[in-house]
Image (cartoon, rainbow, N blue to C red):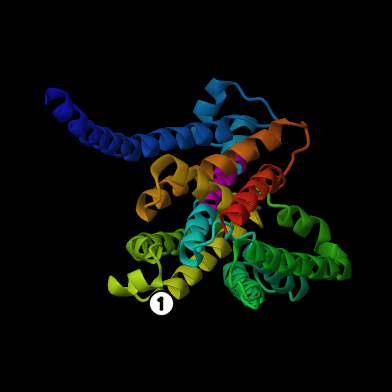
Amino acid sequence: MTSTLTTAGAPGRDRARLAAFARTRLVAAPVLLAVLVAIAIWLSIAVGSVFLPLSDVIAALGGARTNDAHLIVQDLRIPRTVAGVVAGVCLAVAGVLLQGSTRNPLASPTLLGITSGAGFAVVIGVALLGLPSTWAVGLAFVGGAGAASLALALAGTGRDGLSPLRLALSGALVSLLLSAWTQAVLALNEADADEVRHWLAGSLAGRDAAAIPPLLPLLAVGLVAAVLLARPLDALALGDEAAIGLGQRPGRIRVVSGLTAVALAALAVSVAGPIAFLGLIAPHIARFLVGGRHLPVLLASALIGPALLLGADIVGRIVAPPSEVQAGVLTAMIGAPILIRIATRARSVS
């Protein structure tokens, strides 16, 4: 009888251990990710093609711009670090919203054509029409929303609906089309071609420190909206009928999530240009670390995004000195095989 009671109590103890492990993971993962982001921020400020002693970096953080070290740190590295944090947070959170609202593991700003559409709109407005750079966010939002709408419309024309592979193919088609149009515009406007191409590759170099603070209120609004959408997205993950039974409106959730994701992606594009695959990678890493509930995934993704982008930027600075490899090139190199893996798994599941 004692052995029977022991055997009966074992599943209960196992469930308790799993629940304790899950709670520990929800606390430990964000803490470790925050430490990783802090390390990435410090390395982004301290490391570059020009070597600076640690003492000079520390002195430059709070001192007047009296020498070359101070100028490099304050005018070059700090602005690109802030840009990397902002763009990384925006793209990662946008990826969570898109994957949650479409219930598609391949949804991301890159694969829905949002980044390509935003970049195309900015090139048309700023390079071709000569509009002020302060219009970049608005132009990027319009272009990203239009591209995402076209990709979703194309993906929904098939009999199997918004399947992961159909969505990826539709987004790739839209991205290729917009990229070709962008190159055609640049060919007609050679004066700004070199600078724009550098920006279109996804680079944090040469960021204007004064251009970022006005964007922070928009970032705050987008993040608050994302947090408020976490519980509705949890309900939506159970299916439309279950979400309706829980008092949610699936159509409204998808529209608000999509607009918020497009706005965040537009902010990222206006700050750093089109950064490939970051919005795809970060949510999947976050789910692996903290589980499937959207609020922890949003928090973890908002930390993973900057860590990945700053890490790519740091590697790009030192891999081929004195020139640099754009961060967007490195994220594309990392993201392409991950995309293939996710697409293969999604196809096998479906």
In terms of secondary structure, what is the magenta stretch mainly? helix
Quadrant occupied by the N terminus: top left
Q: Nearer the viewer, residue 105 or 278?
A: 105
Instruction: Specify the amino acid type for callout 1.
Output: Arg
Q: Which residue is mark 1?
A: 252
Q: Nearer the viewer, residue 213 or 236?
A: 236
Residue 74, placed above or below residue 2: below
Q: Nearer the viewer, residue 11 or 308?
A: 11
Kindly give the residue lying farthest to the front in the view shown.
1
* Residue 218 is a magenta residue: no
Does the image show residue 71?
A: no
Quadrant occupied by the C terminus: bottom right
Does the image show residue 235?
A: yes
Start-end of magenta stretch: 76-88
Residue 174 % position (x, y):
72, 69
Residue 323, placed above or below residue 142: above
Query: What is the secondary structure assignment of the residue under circle 1?
Result: helix
Kindly give the residue lying farthest to the left in the view shown.
1
Q: Residue at x 45, y 58 (%)?
A: 216
Residue 254 % position (x, y):
46, 72
* Residue 77 is a magenta residue: yes
